[in-house]
Image (tube, grey):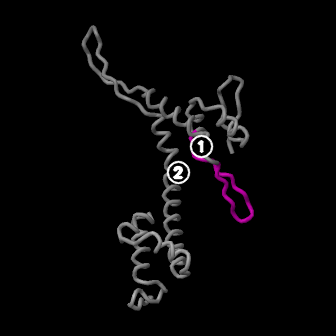
Amino acid sequence: MTKGSQLVARGDDGLMDDQRRYIQKYAETGSEAQAQENLDFPRRRVRNWHNNDQAFRTAFNTVVEGIHEGVVQRLKVVEEKLPDAIEELLSATKSVRVECPKCKLKFSVDIDNTAIQAKMVDMLMKSQGHLKEVTRHEVGVDEEVLSSALRMALSMVQKGAQIGVDSAQELIRRGKIEETSVEGEYRILEE
């Protein structure tokens, strides 16, 4: 391939040096626009590579798949840690300094931090409509996996906290809890 009056050579992978530099910069930044800006490549040049160069498309797609797999792995790690963090916040306490008015004896008492607990419940209720259910498919067997919102709701029921009606209905439907005779209270079913 020629570039002006110069001959442009391709490497063993079929990429030109500029293409290789662009893909490397894209892998570092995760942004096509930023990679183009850093290397001072015009948009039309990169678009031309995408449209007309099979070696470039193959290498670029490989990098993109790697980036997406990394993001998915990080999200899975965060999702696995989330219920434990929520449980910790739901059981948050704060120390209160108390003084006896008669004998002037001072001591500390740990009490529930209802402000943090209320904020967590509020956040859970807001997020319930946005989190999607996850189903894992393995070797012909469908194993249902609870979404992080439902795992948090189940954890709240275990601690005796109130949960939203939607979460409660979904957990009842899945056979994780059952409603008691007292409205708003649920009993966890053993598996």
| 138 within the magenta span | yes
* Magenta highlight range: 133-152
Given this view, does label 1 or label 2 mark the residue nearer the observer? 1
The residue that appears at 61% across and 42% down in the rendered structure is 150
**Is residue 98 toward the left or the right of residue 154 in the image?**
left
**In the rendered image of this protein, does residue 128 appear above or below residue 77?**
above
**In the rendered image of this protein, does residue 7 appear above or below residue 27?**
below
* Residue wearing tag 2: 79
Task: Give percent across and percent down for residue 13.
Answer: 48, 86
Q: Residues within 10 Å of mark 1 (few under 14, many from 20)?
A: few
The residue that appears at 50% across and 39% down in the rendered structure is 87
* Depth check, front residue: 175 or 166: 166
Task: Give percent across and percent down for residue 68.
Answer: 52, 64
Location of residue 182 by image quarter? top right
Under circle 1, the secondary element is loop
The three-letter code of the residue at mark 1 reads His
**In the rendered image of this protein, does residue 141 appear above or below residue 103?**
below
Looking at this view, name the residue that lies furthest to the front.
4
Looking at this view, name the residue that lies furthest to the left.
104
Q: What mark, if any, has residue 130 been given in the picture?
A: 1
Task: Give percent across and percent down for residue 22.
Answer: 41, 74
The three-letter code of the residue at mark 2 reads Glu
* Depth check, front residue: 188 or 63: 63
Task: Give percent across and percent down for residue 139.
Answer: 71, 65
